[in-house]
Amino acid sequence: MLGILDRIPLNILLIAALALGLAPFFPEPHLWEKLKMLAAGTLRRPIDILDLLMHGTPVVLLAAKLLRMAVSRG
């Protein structure tokens, strides 16, 4: 499973995390909006949950790859 993460180029993950994590840029990024909804307990509609997954997945993958790189370097 982690071999797949190792094969994804870091620059691709960075671009995807920035593009999807910050889109749309105005009035506020969806990821931030959905995280606020999650914290407030109002993230109930399936479309909102899907939005959180879509916009958050690249950020989570980037964090996992960076953590894996840091651990493997010792």
Image: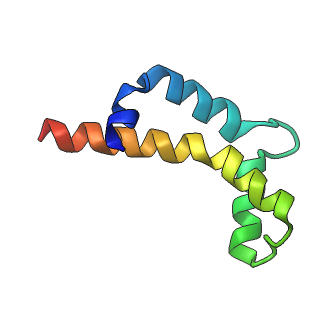
List x then y, in percent, for residue 29: 77, 45
Asked which quadrant contains residue 3, the reply is top left
* Extreme residue in the front direction: 1
Q: Nearer the viewer, residue 72 or 26?
A: 72
Colour mapping: rainbow
Residue at the spot 86% in from the left edge and 67% down from the top edge? 45
* Extreme residue in the left direction: 74
Asked which quadrant contains residue 20, the reply is top right
Residue at the spot 43% in from the left edge and 26% down from the top edge? 8
Q: Nearer the viewer, residue 4 or 48?
A: 4
List x then y, in percent, for residue 22: 71, 38
- Rendered position, 4 above or below 1: above
Residue at the spot 29% in from the left edge and 42% down from the top edge? 68
* Extreme residue in the bottom direction: 41
List x then y, in percent, for residue 17: 59, 35
Asked which quadrant contains residue 15, the reply is top right
List x then y, in percent, for residue 67: 32, 45
As drawn, is 48 to the left or to the right of 12?
Answer: right
- Rendered position, 27 above or below 34: above
The quarter of the rendered structure image containing the N terminus is: top left
- Rendered position, 6 above or below 35: above
* Tag count: 0
- Rendered position, 40 above or below 48: below
Residue at the spot 11% in from the left edge and 41% down from the top edge? 74
As drawn, is 37 to the left or to the right of 56?
Answer: right
